[in-house]
Image: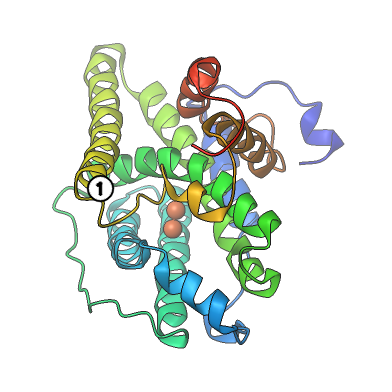
């Protein structure tokens, strides 16, 4: 964003200008780094053990690989060449996330089973669900990343390698909310209730899947949940402080992009609503 874009007239959601901005913002802010060129720092015994003890690796590798294939499939299925190009670039970025996680687990000796994702049957539906899933996950991941970075729990040289992934997820969720709004606005009035229902269902199913994961993990106590409990791994912070941190980090991550584009509102709104009910101070 610059002073000129900030002073432009508001964007009409669903207009050709909205589509162009949604795609150009995404393509122009792409970071062309290469996972193979990342310099993995040597870790001391304590840091290596902490890293191995995080119960997230298998799920993270699987999720990123599945997401990459689904987003690339959607990019290939999208008829509009401008949208297709931006979505395919997002798929490329997701594949990089999968590659980075794979490199990390190999480098630090974290066992993760081999996994071959399957392409979705309905790429549009899969892409919509992925987007809502990322809106949930990124909100908490931004806060967790800040904790990992600022607590000194891991060496800064390691944490820094994940900075581009965090920022990319911020771009992905901005793309998602604008893509959904663009498609909805382009429908004839008669088609909109169906689309709104589909949106709501996608969001609900993603919320439900997070809740199920949390319940399963709580029940077995064998694994931790990256998005809901992992903050406890990084230090003494209350649930309320953690959610406040997530809100601040969310704002910072999304701030650099064109203010005319929509931002994810749902998860931050829920977080603000539940904030007063959360315990303050001490560890949870
Ligand atoms: Fe990702
Ligand atoms: Fe993503």
Say if 263 sits above or below 98 in the image: above
Direction left: furthest residue: 121
Residue 247 % position (x, y): 61, 32
121 left or right of 22 in image = left
Q: Determine the residue positioned at 27% across, 35% down.
A: 211
What is the secondary structure assignment of the residue under circle 1? helix
- Where, quadrant-wise, is the N terminus in this rendering? top right
Q: In front here: 103 or 92?
A: 103
Q: Determine the residue positioned at 46% across, 84% down.
A: 108
Query: Which quadrant holds residue 17?
Result: top right
Say if 207 sits above or below 169 in the image: above
107 left or right of 24 in image = left
Residue 225 % position (x, y): 35, 49
Question: Colour scheme of this structure image?
Answer: rainbow
Residue 184 % position (x, y): 36, 25
Is residue 68 visible in the rendered image? The answer is yes
Q: Determine the residue positioned at 60% across, 40% down.
A: 21
Q: In front here: 55 or 46?
A: 46
Q: In front here: 57 or 256?
A: 57
15 left or right of 105 in image = right
Q: Determine the residue positioned at 38% across, 31% down.
A: 183
Is residue 24 visible in the rendered image? The answer is no
Label 1 belongs to which residue?
217
* Crowdedness near tag 1: few (<14), some (14–19) or many (≥20) residues, C-alpha within 10 Å: some
Direction front: furthest residue: 282
Query: Which quadrant holds residue 94?
Result: bottom left
Query: Which quadrant holds residue 161?
Result: bottom right
Residue 129 % position (x, y): 29, 41
Say if 182 sits above or below 276 in the image: below
Say if 28 sits above or below 246 in the image: below
What count of labels does the image hold?
Answer: 1
Q: In front here: 194 or 251?
A: 251
């Amino acid at each position: 964003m610059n002073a000129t874009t900030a002073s432009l007239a508001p964007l009409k959601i669903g207009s050709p200008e909205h589509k162009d901005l949604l795609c150009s913002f995404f393509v122009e802010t792409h970071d062309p780094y290469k996972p193979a060129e990342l310099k993995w720092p040597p870790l001391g015994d304590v840091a290596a053990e902490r890293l191995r003890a995080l119960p997230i690796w298998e799920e993270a590798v699987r999720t990123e690989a599945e997401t990459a294939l689904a987003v690339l499939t959607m990019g290939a299925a999208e008829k509009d060449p401008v949208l297709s190009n931006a979505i395919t670039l997002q798929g490329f970025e997701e594949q990089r996330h999968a590659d980075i996680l794979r490199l990390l687990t190999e480098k630090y000796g974290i066992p993760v089973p081999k996994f071959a994702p399957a392409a979705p049957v309905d790429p549009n539906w899969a892409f919509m669900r992925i987007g809502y899933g990322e809106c949930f996950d990124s909100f908490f991941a931004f806060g967790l990343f800040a904790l990992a970075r600022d607590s000194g729990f891991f060496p800064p040289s390691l944490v820094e390698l994940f900075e581009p992934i965090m920022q990319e997820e911020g771009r992905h969720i901005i793309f998602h909310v604008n893509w959904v709004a663009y498609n909805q606005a382009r429908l004839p009035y008669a088609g909109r209730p169906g689309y709104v229902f589909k949106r709501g269902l996608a969001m609900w199913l993603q919320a439900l899947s997070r809740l199920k994961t949390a319940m399963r993990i709580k029940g077995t106590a064998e694994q931790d949940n990256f998005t809901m409990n992992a903050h406890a791994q990084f230090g003494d912070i209350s649930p309320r402080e953690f959610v406040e941190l997530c809100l601040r980090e969310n704002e910072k991550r999304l701030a650099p992009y064109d203010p005319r584009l929509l931002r994810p509102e749902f998860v931050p709104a829920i977080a603000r609503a539940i904030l007063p009910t959360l315990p303050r101070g001490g560890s949870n």
